[in-house]
Amino acid sequence: MTDHRGEWVLLAYRMPREPSSPRIAVWRKLKRLGIAQIGDGLAGLPADARTREHFDWIAEEVEEHGGTATVWLARPASAAQEHRLAAEMAGARAAEYRAVIAQAAEGAHLAPGARSRLVRRLREELRRINRRDHFPPPQRDQARRAVQDLAGDAAPQATTPATAQAEETTP
């Protein structure tokens, strides 16, 4: 029987409670990576060179602030466990994409200049979400379409030679 489970990189860490700012900074970095919170002080991501490197950097930061950290490569014991982790991660990203969809819908009523600024901000937000989107949910494509539609509404209509000719011949 072939094992189809993927390899994960895990970060096990403990940090002193005080001062709290280094602990908060580490937590924010982990959240930006889109981690699966496996347990208290145990975070995981699908293993690749980028995620391993990020966890190595964070482990160094934890140790610089008086904590302990180890980085592990592992496979979940069952496909069900891996699916549960992936579903949790996809669910978190889906919520972020739904927020983008809602903001794009609200932006349809803005003046063109404000709408253009919103489009730029939402595109940047999509890039940030995409960097931590390891198991893309259907909402990813919906969010991209919503922002594209908003961008289309914000852009002045370009006149092509074909449309100009059609407008001239229309009674």
Image: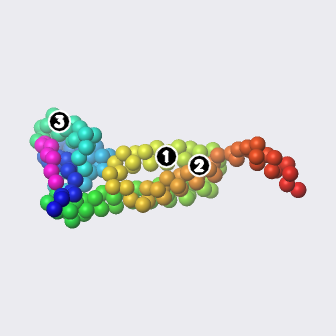
The answer to whether 139 is drawn above or below residue 164 in the figure is: below
In the drawing, does residue 147 fall left or right of residue 113?
left
In the drawing, does residue 65 fall left or right of residue 171?
left
Q: Of marks 2 and 3, which one's residue comes earlier in the chain?
A: 3
- Three-letter residue code for mark 2: Ala
- Three-letter residue code for mark 3: Glu
Q: Quadrant of residue 18?
A: top left
**Image mark for residue 86:** none
The residue tagged 1 is 123
Image x and y of residue 45, in percent: 24, 50
Asked if marks 2 and 3 touch (Cβ < 8 Å), the reply is no
Q: Which residues are magenta?
A: 69-75
Observer-nearest of 1 and 170: 1
The residue at the point 20 percent across, 62 percent down is 79
SS assignment for the magenta stretch, majority:
strand
State the SS at label 1.
Answer: helix
The residue tagged 2 is 151
**Image mark for residue 60:** 3
Asked if marks 2 and 1 touch (Cβ < 8 Å), the reply is yes
Q: Could you classify mark 2 by the number of other residues whose Cα lies within 10 Å: few (under 14), some (14-19), or many (20 or more)?
A: many
Image x and y of residue 62, in percent: 17, 39
In the drawing, does residue 167 fall left or right of residue 54?
right
Asked if marks 1 and 3 touch (Cβ < 8 Å), the reply is no
Image x and y of residue 155, in percent: 64, 46
